[in-house]
Image (tube, rainbow, N blue to C red):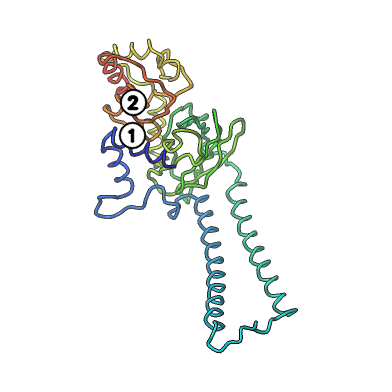
Amino acid sequence: MLGCVRRWFLTIIIVGITPVAAFAEDWGMGASNAKIPPSSTFQAVSTPAHEINTVAFFVISITGVIFLIVAGLLTYSIVRFRTRAGDDGREPPQVYGSNPIEFAWTTVPVLISFVLFLITARVIYVVQARPQPPDALSVRVIGHQWWWEFRYPGLGIVTANELHVPVSELASPTPTFLDLESADVAHSFWVPRLAGKTDVIPNKKNTMWIDPHVPGTYLGQCAEFCGTEHAMMLLRVVVESRADFDNWVATQKQPPRVDPAVARGRQVFQSTACVNCHAVQGTGADGRFGPDLTHLMARETIGSGVAMNTRDHLRIWVADPNVMKPGALMPAMGLDNQDLDALVDYLVTLR
């Protein structure tokens, strides 16, 4: 844990104030009116998260009442039966074999446990057993060390680290169903305001669904320790109106524009090891080990949330990803400044 914290502060120092400003904006810091944190578990905007909150608060309420009763009786006993001057040190009369007492402290806990079991079972059924309607959006989520890949099979779209979904109106629900897989080790997909944690296991497909009712950007992360940069395996879920989502889909389906002004950078990209790991529509790059870069600059962050997606940060990342994300599996390209600038100029056109 301390190592993760140290790496985060190292990233802030190296990259600059931009990531801090981005998170401050997300959390409402510095604004006149504080906003709800985008990863607050207490402000659910999707049915699964709401159901989890409901059962959590119910359990807290029941156990809170039990605590108050037990603590009250204990306090009363300590005060009422405390040692007084003149006590002879003998034990007070003990109660044995009281059928009403035995019945009460056996029946009450059983009833409480039974109620908690029924409530929990209902929530599990609501969250896990919902059938996928024909018009639901289907997304395949693949966890990698240390980034997220999102594939939309019905739309022919591949992107990374930022999941776009349409808002689910109460009058016309449009849930999003996620098929979760891992390409390497165990991960865990968690966006607190949308749903609970779901493990992402190698050679196994888990499923979950969300139906966000409020547009916005919701932060999530990997919740299962998965190696060196587990703390920097972040993600964003962008919930948009149907019109905005359709526009995003249309843009994602288009190949990036070919700009003659960055021909040299395009040539550098196609002649280096970039093409072995990354894919860009309209080029010979068809790698599958790293994120698809076809619409790289349409994303808010790079490095799975390690920094905001600006030209300066992108240059640092391409030059040596380990500066921002120690332990990242992407190697330093070893380019000279001219080729590096040309390559970054080309990547900036990928929108």
Element on which disc 1 rests? strand
Q: Quadrant of residue 32?
A: bottom left
Name the spot of residue 105 as percent of width and height, x first: 67, 72
Q: Quadrant of residue 258?
A: top left
Q: How many marks?
A: 2
| C-alpha separation, residue under disc 1 versus residue under disc 2 | 9 Å
Q: Is residue 21 above or below residue 183?
A: below
Name the spot of residue 86 as percent of width and height, x first: 56, 89
Name the spot of residue 125 as percent of width and height, x first: 62, 51
Q: Which residue is mark 1?
A: 307
Name the spot of residue 62 as percent of width and height, x first: 56, 66
Which residue is more in the foreground, 35 or 229?
229
> Image point 43% across, 19% down: which residue?
279
Question: Dot 2 surroundings within 10 Å: few (below 14), some, or many (20 or more)?
Answer: many
Q: Relative to 150, is 320 on the left or the right?
A: left
Q: Which residue is mark 2?
A: 317
Q: Is residue 235 visible?
A: no
Residue type at mark 1 is Ala
Badge 1 vs badge 2, beta-carbon distance below 8 Å: yes
> Image point 42% across, 51% down: which residue?
40
Quick one: which residue is furthest to the bottom in this view?
Answer: 86
Element on which disc 2 rests? helix
N-terminal of the two: label 1 or label 2?
Answer: 1
Residue 56, disc: none
Residue type at mark 2 is Trp
Question: Dot 1 surroundings within 10 Å: few (below 14), some, or many (20 or more)?
Answer: many
Q: In the picture, which quadrant includes the N terminus?
A: top left
> Image point 71% across, 79% down: which residue?
100
Q: In the picture, which quadrant includes the C terminus?
A: top left
